[in-house]
Image (cartoon, rainbow, N blue to C red):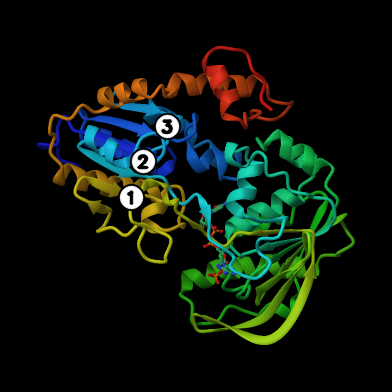
């Protein structure tokens, strides 16, 4: 149980209204019921990766937003959308209004692939591509060409699986998802024959979870395939009992994929292991990816010198994320996170979520982060008579900033639900100006 102390009356701003921000807000509100918490988001809409990262066909996972709505409605929490800290308002300005600021703005950019040809048209990072099919306004104009033959998805994590699965599903299978309408239209006429999901390590090291693999065995129009020659008989003794059990389940999936008939469905999803990308080939757009075969030696991946190519018209790399440099805080190190002392970046400035830990972990991992940071803030920060939201709101007025509150979000959500196609939970707005029109009560239809 957290203790209340001199922190009572604190004014805290949280930058980022995704899972990390909401869990930090919840923990702070519980620890300090008379503090004032402002949850600030760059988009007019809340929920961060729940809305724009979690796969559109994983609606059960997205239902966590019901919990976040309950948090947003707590008396001492205020949602403020459509305000970019580091853009509309600087971090220094924000800090002048609040006793403490918690950065919960994640890692929204793609870690670079960093090989020749990675800047060719039709080569996208996961943040872009997932953002496109999830209707994130930043990526609504991406317009990927899904017009021929093969796709290469680089990476062996759950994001790579999400992308490969969305590309492999039929329009019928996506009908009850909240995939962006532009993506559903494009996928409905896509002419893709082979989706290759390629990992630089082996099947044993792959970071997929079993539930995600099992789903791939049940697709209507795509058959998941693996090469039996790439699969070990069993999982080695070097892993803990728990890891062996989990890895064995994955191995069973791959073994089933190795038995599948490649001609049993119109499209194939092929797992390929021990191959690291060395070059994207093509002139005006991507034509193939060149790989070098690898072997895993302890923790390291070593090239064997053996080269091969996979022809494709689209490449998506899902190899991790990095933070945005927009905040003006010093992002140190090369490990894609903000350096902190257990969450404290500087006096009165804190960090949680992917920006603190790096891009890993489950949604619930953020709850632990939130509780830890709340304890730290309550122990370290005293209320100092700052204005909190009232001062920030004056600045919004001076700058004519149109910010959204939670009621605005509910109006946007209601319009999305009303516009949903049969079976779908919503039809997302993909443009900020359209969202804001709804808030002004001017009828608008999602794009
Ligand atoms: P991840 O699990 O860390 O996987 C990243 C993959 O990229 C790894 O296979 C990694 O290989 C590979 N990689 C990194 N750099 C590479 C390079 N230069 N060339 C080739 N491959 C490279 O990350 P993620 O898939 O982005 O997922 C992020 C987090 O979100 C994870 O915790 C994930 O479980 C979670 N998530 C969960 C779900 C779900 O539960 N359904 C869905 C989506 C995301 P090495 O292993 O060799 O480094």
Q: Residue furthest left?
A: 6
Dot 3 alpha-carbon crowd within 10 angstroms: few under 14, some 14 to 19, many 20 or more: many
Q: Quadrant of the C terminus?
A: top right
Which residue shows up at 78% across the image and 44% down it? 187
Q: Please give the residue where the numbered disc 3 appears in the rendered image.
A: 83
- Mark 1 vs 2: CB contact within 8 A: yes
Q: Please give the residue where the numbered disc 1 appears in the rendered image.
A: 369
User: Closest to the observer: 157 or 81?
Assistant: 81
Tell me the distance, in whole angstroms, between the alpha carbons under discs 3 and 2.
20 Å
* Left or right relative to 12: residue 337: right
Q: Is residue 211 visible in this depiction of the protein?
A: no
Q: Is residue 433 visible in this depiction of the protein?
A: yes
Q: Position of residue 245 (x, y in %)?
A: 54, 69
Tell me the distance, in whole angstroms, between the alpha carbons under discs 1 and 2.
8 Å
Which residue shows up at 87% across the image and 55% down it? 265
* Left or right relative to 291: residue 108: left
Q: Please give the residue where the numbered disc 2 appears in the rendered image.
A: 23
Q: Secondary structure at mark 3?
A: loop
Q: Quadrant of residue 391?
A: top left
Q: Position of residue 218 (x, y in %)?
A: 75, 52
Q: Earlier in the sequence, mark 1 or mark 3?
A: 3
Q: Quadrant of residue 417?
A: top right
Indicate the quadrant of ligand 1 in the picture. bottom right
Q: What is the total number of numbered labels drawn onto the structure image?
A: 3
Q: Position of residue 356 (x, y in %)?
A: 36, 55
Q: Quadrant of the N terminus?
A: top left
Q: Earlier in the sequence, mark 3 or mark 2?
A: 2
Which residue shows up at 66% across the image and 53% down it? 163
Q: Is residue 426 above or below residue 290?
A: above
């Amino acid at each position: 149980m957290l203790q209340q102390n001199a922190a009572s009356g604190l004014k805290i701003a949280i930058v980022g209204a995704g899972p990390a921000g909401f869990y930090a807000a919840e923990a702070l509100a519980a620890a300090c019921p008379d503090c004032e918490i402002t949850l600030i988001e760059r988009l007019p809409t809340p929920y961060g990766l729940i809305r724009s990262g979690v796969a559109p066909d994983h609606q059960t996972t997205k239902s966590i937003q019901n919990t976040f709505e309950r948090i947003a409605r707590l008396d001492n929490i205020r949602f403020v959308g459509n305000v970019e800290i580091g853009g509309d308002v600087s971090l220094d300005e924000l800090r002048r209004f609040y006793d403490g600021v918690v950065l919960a703005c994640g890692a929204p950019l793609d870690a670079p692939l960093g090989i020749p040809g990675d800047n060719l048209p039709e080569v996208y990072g996961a943040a872009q591509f997932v953002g496109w099919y999830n209707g994130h306004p930043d990526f609504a104009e991406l317009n990927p060409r899904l017009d021929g033959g093969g796709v290469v998805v680089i990476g062996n994590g759950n994001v790579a699986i999400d992308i490969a699965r969305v590309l492999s599903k039929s329009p019928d299978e996506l009908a009850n998802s909240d995939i962006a309408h532009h993506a559903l239209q494009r996928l409905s006429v896509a002419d893709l024959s082979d989706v290759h999901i390629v990992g630089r390590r082996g099947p044993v090291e792959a970071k997929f979870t079993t539930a995600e693999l099992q789903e791939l065995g049940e697709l209507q129009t795509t058959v998941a395939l693996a090469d039996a020659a790439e699969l070990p008989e069993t999982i080695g003794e070097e892993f803990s009992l728990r890891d062996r059990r989990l890895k064995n389940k994955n191995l069973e999936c791959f073994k089933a994929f190795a038995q599948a008939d490649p001609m049993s469905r119109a499209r194939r999803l092929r797992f390929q292991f021990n191959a690291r990308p060395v070059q994207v080939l093509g002139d005006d757009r991507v034509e193939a990816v060149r790989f070098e075969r690898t072997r895993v030696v302890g923790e390291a991946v070593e090239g064997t010198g053996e080269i091969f190519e996979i022809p494709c018209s689209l490449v998506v790399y899902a190899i991790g994320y990095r933070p945005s440099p927009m905040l003006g805080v010093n992002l140190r190190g090369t490990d894609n996170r903000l350096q902190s002392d257990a969450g404290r970046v500087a006096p009165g400035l804190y960090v949680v979520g992917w920006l603190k830990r790096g891009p890993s972990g489950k949604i619930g991992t953020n709850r632990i982060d939130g509780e830890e940071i709340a304890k730290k803030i309550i122990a370290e920060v005293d209320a100092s008579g700052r204005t909190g939201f009232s001062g920030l709101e004056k600045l919004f007025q001076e700058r004519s900033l149109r910010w959204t509150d939670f009621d605005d979000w509910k109006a946007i959500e209601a319009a999305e639900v009303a516009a949903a196609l049969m079976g779908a939970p919503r039809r997302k707005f993909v443009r900020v100006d359209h969202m804001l029109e709804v808030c002004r009560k001017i009828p608008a239809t999602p794009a």
